[in-house]
Image (cartoon, helix red, strand yellow):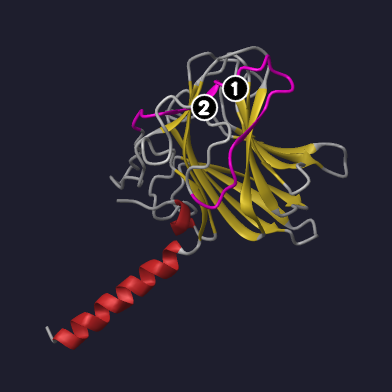
Amino acid sequence: MNSSILKTGLIMTAATLLNASAELKAYDGFSVPADYEHRAELLGTNGGTGFEPWQVDLSSNDGNSRRYIASKKPVTHTDAKGNTLVTAPGCMLCKPAGSGKGALTRNLDKALEGTVWISFLTQLDEQVGYGWDIQFLDEKGEMQFKVMNGRKEQNRWRIQSAVQASGKPKDGLFQSQPGMTPMELTLIVLKVENVGSKSDDGSVTAFLNPKDLRDAELTAMASVKIKGLELNPIKTFSFDKKSTAEGIIDELRFGERVEDVLPYQ
């Protein structure tokens, strides 16, 4: 092959990769020991990129912030076609420490608008009936939508919006399918559209364990959608759990395209 052609190809490839990675707005793989110390509290730490430091609201808790710690436990996910998600060594471990609830929150460096893709891995322990709310807030701290599980969801995943003009939230409950309960490691992918449009044209589409990481929209195992939402710009990730719930969160990504939040090896 002509060396000049090869050189040009390499330059174009590098430029393409740079442009692709530039669309990833925020990421935390809870890498131990690169970003976090094993069994260290997340409160006040600042691993990953695109975020401000972690905060823990203990207003309804007994003061024990060790319910959220970094762990060196390895977490991996492979889709039905054998594609493996890129993961860092480590995860966030949610422990049943203390009493009451304690919300873990983290602000993005910049509020996100337009089309926003979000992905993360999560797994609940076997204590059916106790779960958590994974919420996405605006700059005023008001919840725009959330992903939740627990007693009301009958051991299934649900997405729900903030209260609408009708006085009720809009929600979508995933149907029961093998391999899709909160007690199993689950890859959750969210496509949020028309964020910050100041109109009720916003929507949230959620995917559980896409069959092919390369195309969550077309080959999802199952999906639910809530629409007709007026969504403010997304500024904060919030994780609120019951005192007895235990499990993990890992590979939290915010991007502009599905490829940004589903990189595979």
Q: Amino acid at mark 2?
A: Glu
What is the count of numbered marks? 2
Residue, x 39% and y 39% (percent of image)? 31
**Magenta highlight range:** 49-74
As drawn, 172 above or below 64? below
The furthest residue to the right: 166
The quadrant holding residue 77 is top left
Residue at x-position 61% and y-position 21%: 150
Which residue position is annotated with label 2? 41
Q: Nearer the viewer, residue 143 or 78?
A: 143
Q: Identify which residue is drawn at 52% across, 42% down.
A: 46
Callout 1–callout 2 Cβ contact below 8 Å: yes
Residue 64 placement, left or right of 42 = right
Q: Which residue is mark 1?
A: 65
Please tell me whether mark 2 sits on a helix, a strand or a loop.
Answer: loop
> Residue at the location (42% across, 51% down)?
262
Q: Would residue 190 be counted in the magenta stretch?
A: no
Q: Is 65 on the left or on the right of 228, as rendered?
A: left
